[in-house]
Amino acid sequence: VDAKAYNLVIAALGRAGRADRAVRLIDESCRAGLVPDVVAYTAAISACDPELALRLLDDMRANGVRANVVTYTTAMRVLVDGHQHPSEEEEPSASASRRRRRRHEGGGGGVYWPRALGLLQEMRDAGVAPNA
C-alpha cells in the first residue's frame, strides 16, 4: 500500500463521516512512514468532533503537512458548529436557519469560539488568505 492509496481511502472515509476509521488509518499510515496529504487530513477533520479536529491539526503540523484555506475553514466550522456530519445527524438539505437554531440552542461548539478565532489568526500568520 502506498501513500496515494492511504490518502484516497482516508479522504473517502472523512467525506462519509467515518472519523473513527479515518483517524485510525491516518495513524496507521504515519506508523508506516506514509504521511497523509492535506486533502486527506481536511476530509478527516470535516468528520471529527472539535477535540479530534484539533488533534488532527496538531498531527498535521508535527508531520510537516501545511494546512490550506480549506483545512482552516473546515476546522473552524467544526469548532464553531460542533460535529455534525450530514450522513450521521441531519439531512444535507437542512436549512441554514435550522442549523443556526441548533447552535443557538446549545447544539454547537460555543466553547470552541476562542480556538476558532485563534485558527483565523494562525491562518493569517501562515500567509493563507481567508476566503469569503
Image: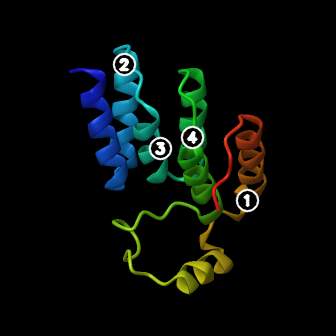
- Residue at the spot 44% in from the left edge and 81% down from the top edge: 94
In the rendered image, which residue does mark 3 sit on?
A: 42
In the rendered image, which residue does mark 1 sit on?
A: 111
In primary-sequence order, the first of circles 1 and 4 is 4
Q: What element carries label 4?
A: loop
In primary-sequence order, the first of circles 1 and 2 is 2
Q: Is label 4 or label 3 in front?
A: 4
What is the distance, in whole Å, between disc 1 and disc 2 at their CAs?
34 Å
**Residue at the limit of the structure toward the left, as seen here:** 1
In the rendered image, which residue does mark 4 sit on?
A: 68
What is the distance, in whole Å, between disc 1 and disc 3 at their CAs?
22 Å
For the residue carrying disc 1, how many other residues have a C-alpha within 10 Å: few (<14), some (14-19), or many (20+)? few
Q: What element carries label 3?
A: helix
Q: Which of 22 and 2 is in front in this view?
A: 2
Question: Which quarter of the picture shows residue 39?
Answer: top left
Q: Which dot marks residue 34?
A: 2
Q: Which amino acid does label 3 sit on?
A: Thr
